[in-house]
Amino acid sequence: MMLLPTGSSNKASQPATMLLLLPMLLLVSVIKGAGAGGIGVNYGTRGTTLPPPADVARFLARDTIVDRVRLFDTDPLLLQAFADSGLAVDVTAPNGLVPRLVSLAFARRWVAENVAPYARSTNISRILVGNEVTTEANRTLLLALVPAMQNVHTALVAVSLHGRIKVSTTHSLGVLTTTERPSAGRFRDGYDAAIVKPLLRFLRATGAPFMVNAYPFYGLTHDTLDFALFRVNAGVMDDGSGLVYSNMLDAQLDAVHSAIRRLGFGDIDIVVSETGWPSAGEDWEVGVGADLARDYNKNAIRHLGSGVGTPLMPNRTFEVSIFSLFDENLKPGPVSERNFGLFRGDMTPVYDVGIFTAPETVEPVNTKVTPVPNSGEAMVERQWCVPTPAADEMVLQENIDFACSQEGVDCAAIRPGGICYEPDTVQGHAAYAMNLYFNTNGKHTYDCDFGQTGVVTSVDPSYGDCKFM
Ligand SMILES: *[C@@H]1O[C@H](CO)[C@@H](O)[C@H](O)[C@H]1NC(C)=O
Ligand SMILES: *[C@@H]1O[C@H](CO)[C@@H](O)[C@H](O)[C@H]1NC(C)=O
Ligand SMILES: *[C@@H]1O[C@H](CO)[C@@H](O)[C@H](O)[C@H]1NC(C)=O
């Protein structure tokens, strides 16, 4: 599997192939508590029909669980709109300003004019110095980055705002070398010592997070669609760490973590400053569609807020900001670039991503089959029972022992030599045994409970010759 892009393009290509190693269930979000890490939206304004900022702020504050918004500049109208809204606001010093911020005098003036006056009533919580500068392939920008960040911080100190407002910058995954294994993640050659180390030193000293724009959508193939969408899939083993990945976002975040830890800064927090999925695209773009965008964003929010963490960063939540709040019809590039929005210009949702404050109807993710491009088959609602992602191995082993001891449940396929024996993992065997038990007993939801370690899905966990009933 290739997890990470090469080259300097923002959202370059990512996965090519992947090993189908483990039948695993991934991210069926039965876990409550999404948003513990904070849910943000990226509020870009490159659209002709966007609503007035005051309406947007009121809507987000009153009708959604979004608690953070990121702006791509310091537009006074937007900053004023979020005054007393309760939302935290991240503002951006656009790339063009980065070389100028290398002058401390300029940085002081910029902060005094563009940030300080609004910080009294708007909860500005971060200044992002540039966007994806580390993959812009512009030496002037690159060399200016850390000095500019330092100066902005110094300017904040002068007006006593440094306690409230952190300074960071956002990176695309292109800041890492291409790697097949999350545990092998490292920064691009030549960047480690020269750029990234001073950057990490600055982030640690000021208590600011490392912010990454991560898009499993880019570089998608039909083979990696389930892995990217948090659906049931075969999983991918990182043979460096022995850990199994059930979704691409985890793999990307762990690659970032590995790279940071390699330089000795593993304690720095990681924030997902952008992730998202387009609801429409060109014919040749794999995996675009409103249903898929909804599933990805919903699953990403729930997963990152669930407290499960990633294989290398277990038991934690992540702050995540969805890209983007609105479809933006003035953006260049392929059709998908203009269709990342959760909302249309009239503030109607493109799909229901589950961020409204109104009580959500209880509907587990992944209970509907989403058409996979090229599948061409009529969709029938079939159901399987599989382990929850967080289920303990010891409990799963008990599930196997229990299910396989029941009358009518034939577990020959997961015994040595059986067609579903390989890969020999507790999760894989448990999925097979639990599903068989569920089917044999008439597919009642309660027959898939297994002490809350099982969950019903409509995504077929079969792989290779191993067919699930
Ligand atoms: C401002 O945002 C921060 C998150 O950065 C949050 O912890 C804090 O409670 C917010 N303050 C107010 C007054 O809303
Ligand atoms: C590098 O970025 C600066 C600031 O945005 C810009 O003025 C300059 O033209 C860029 N250089 C190149 C070679 O693109
Ligand atoms: C994560 O949480 C689980 C359950 O609370 C616990 O058993 C496990 O030891 C924790 N792992 C780490 C690395 O903290």
Image (tube, helix red, strand yellow):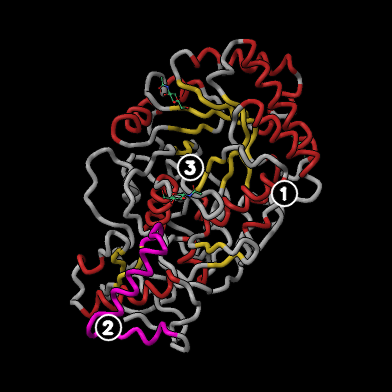
Q: Earlier in the sequence, mark 1 or mark 2?
A: 1
Quarter location, residue 412: bottom left
Structural crowding at the residue carrying mark 1, measured as other residues with C-alpha within 10 Å and reported as few (<14), some (14–19) or many (≥20):
many
CA distance separating discs 3 and 2 = 41 Å
Question: Where ligand 1 lies, by image quadrant?
Answer: top left
CA distance separating discs 1 and 3 = 21 Å
Count the numbered circles shown. Answer: 3
Location of the N terminus (image quadrant) = bottom right
User: Residue at image x 73%, y 14%?
Assistant: 105
Magenta segment boundaries in residue numbering? 388-415
Q: Mark 1 points at which residue?
A: 187
CA distance separating discs 1 and 2 = 50 Å
- Residue 22 to residue 256: above or below: below
Residue 469 place in picture, x, y as percent: 31, 81
The reply to whether discs 3 and 2 touch (Cβ–Cβ < 8 Å) is: no
Amino acid carrying mark 2 in the image: Val
